[in-house]
Amino acid sequence: MADDRLVPGLAATAPARRALLIASVAALPAVLAACRGVQALGTPPPPPADVDTLRDAIEHETALVASYAAAATGGPLAPVLAVVLADHRQHLAQLSSRLIEPAAHGSTTPTPAAGGRGVVMTVAQLEQAEQAASDRLIAQLAGLPPVLAQLFASIAASEATHVPYLRAAGQGR
């Protein structure tokens, strides 16, 4: 250590620096003890409304995919339903690609549309589900960012076109 008398001005400041260093080292255990009760990251904030809306749309689209998959397993309308099922799988892929974080909550378990009630009931249920999905997506457009609103509008239009397609297919059988 240098002699404090050889460096001008050091003699007056050296004890103050040493005292500060000793005090900070002595305070370190108290600071660490106080930090133990605090979570490092804390509770995450709730997701923005558009993320919740996107998750909701994904859950509903998943339910439509499950309904069509159950209804398209056989019967005279299986080829028609398979075409619409492919559309819904594309919708689900597009929606899912927009969600960066996977949903933290479980999805609802969809009820298959067929339920053993015959082709007419299946088509009627699917028509109602398509119209409800289209209406729901259109109702959510106002609060969404433009890119997501465009996707929702496109999917709503597609689902609305499925209604007359199903109706015509059901009448032709």
Image (cartoon, grey):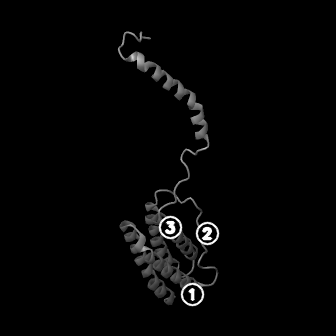
Across and down, in percent, residue 40 comes to 55, 44
Question: Where is mark 3, residue-wise?
Answer: 58
Q: Residues within 10 Å of mark 3 (few under 14, many from 20)?
A: many
Element class at badge 3: helix
Across and down, in percent, residue 100 comes to 46, 57
What's under tag 1, amino acid-wise?
Val
Q: Compared with residue 86, is residue 96 higher up or lower down, i.e. above or below?
A: above
What's under tag 3, amino acid-wise?
Ile
Report the residue at 52% width, 83% height from top: 128
- Which sits earlier in the primary sequence, circle 2 or circle 1? 2
Q: Nearer the viewer, residue 165 or 104?
A: 104
Q: Which of 168 and 103 is in front in this view?
A: 103
Q: How far apart are marks 3 and 1 (CA)?
A: 27 Å
Question: Where is mark 2, residue-wise?
Answer: 109
Q: How far apart are marks 2 and 3 (CA)?
A: 13 Å
Across and down, in percent, residue 145 comes to 38, 66
What's under tag 2, amino acid-wise?
Thr
Q: Quadrant of residue 103?
A: bottom right
